[in-house]
Image: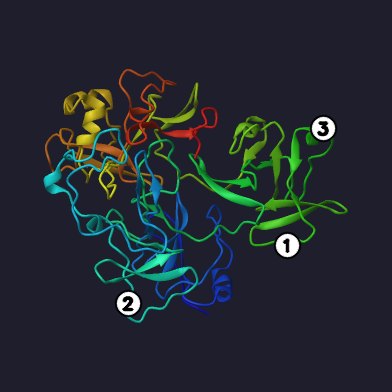
Amino acid sequence: MRAFKVVMPMALSVLVLLLAGDPASAQQARGKPTAEREDFLPEPMPPGFQVIGNEIEGPVFADANGRTLYRWPLRGLRNGDVGDRKNAASNCGAEIYNVNSGLQSPWPPGLALPDAGVRRSCQDLWPAVIATADAKPVGKWSIIARKDGAKQWAYDGYPIYTSNLDKQPGDVLGGSNRRARGDAPGVREPLGPHANVPPAFSVVMVGSGRMLVNYSGFSVYSWDGDGPDKSNCAAACLASWAPVLAAESSQPQGEWTIVQRQPGIRQWAFRKKPLYTYIADAKPRSMMGSDEPGWHNVYTQHAPAWPAEFTQQETHAGIVLADAKGKTIYLYACGDDALDQQACDHPASPQGYRYSVCGGNDAARCLKTFPYVVAARDAKSPSRSWTTIDIDPMTGLFAQAGQAGALHVWAYRGRPVYTFADEKPGDVDGDAWGEFYGARNGYKAFWLRDDFYSNAG
């Protein structure tokens, strides 16, 4: 049996597996998954690589030091493509780009980028995962020659990297698998194993967590009126709810069981809760069925808890996270238009982009338009994804220790969160504020439920 260990940094229980060999052995070593932690299918991995659970992204691959692994797949932009091609050398190298590429924006190429004098190279921000001289391909893991001659690990044909933003095992601060709409930049994607779900299901990321959908992308639901592995939905109930049926050849697996509704009719259950689709759902990833009393969307894991003083507010477009006064909370998103598509949404990155859209390059005006959500000095986070950080309000960068005038603010995934000027509870006037409806450089509301507005995912 291969090595197995459990790592529990802070309040987060993180499942860590060293899957260096036989998948069957790893499956036995793993045992039963922790409640509210997504189970996954084991697969062969290079020696020392591991799987770590993350509150938002679910299970992710990591190197021997616990640093999450990412890929940068080719993405089509407005005027061309950026990223890595499959089975080809990495496009993330030592060159430092000081001008825009013209691929993403309507502006012509060659324009100077903000803070060009302090920009770093792509490989500084995204270190390549280098293979040792005696490394051998295994499973989906292969080795690709870099342009500088070094050997780089690849997964499913794409070169892999770590992020300089990740500081401890389980961090996934460099990128996300939640798909951005419109003209969003080519972000890096954390890599992970396949979720342990039957072929008729998949897992999608929405604001409320990692949600189960069927093969067509439609949400599946559970009902409080059912018992463990027992369906009580019959007669009138079946006029609105369709049991998710299991084929005769389907077999229970992991957290998945099969309920015998009647001879020859079998129904899937997850964590002992029979599953249904809502007949009235008109589109994939809907949450409308959860408006019915006693019915719930089903998650492999819910989104992490937010600070205790925060609230939920219903808006004309969905349900948002809000501060203690009910004002909508906003996230800032940004990716620059250089060929290496550097992120510009973090306090360690240039703030010129943000200042351009929130206040015409006036820091004081930005503080009025999108003020930070200030945290008490003794504020405690209920989850690892929410932290408090100190910000220099006039630069937008991290404040120095003991700096006069610094703001102590709430941050999500290491990025500050904001409210919008002059809003009252239920307003979302700052949503899509910025370039390309906030997709490339701008602010988006912190949607907890966005299926009304078709923003989900």
Mark 2 and mark 1: span between their CA atoms? 41 Å
Residue 134's disc is none
Query: Picture quarter containing residue 330?
Result: top left
Q: Earlier in the sequence, mark 3 or mark 1?
A: 3
Q: Position of residue 86 (x, y in %)?
A: 42, 60
Residue at 48%, 68% in the rendered image: 140
Residue 95 vs residue 195: left or right? left
Q: Residue at x 21, y 31 (%)?
A: 355
Which residue position holds label 1? 251
Q: Sequence-wise, which precedes: disc 3 or disc 2?
A: 2
Placement of 119 over or under 143, stated as above or below: above
Which secondary structure, mark 1? loop
Confirm or deny contact between disc 3 and disc 1 (CB under 8 A).
no
Q: Is residue 446 visible?
A: yes
Q: Residue furthest bottom?
A: 134
Quarter assignment of residue 114: top left
What amino acid does circle 1 point to?
Answer: Gln
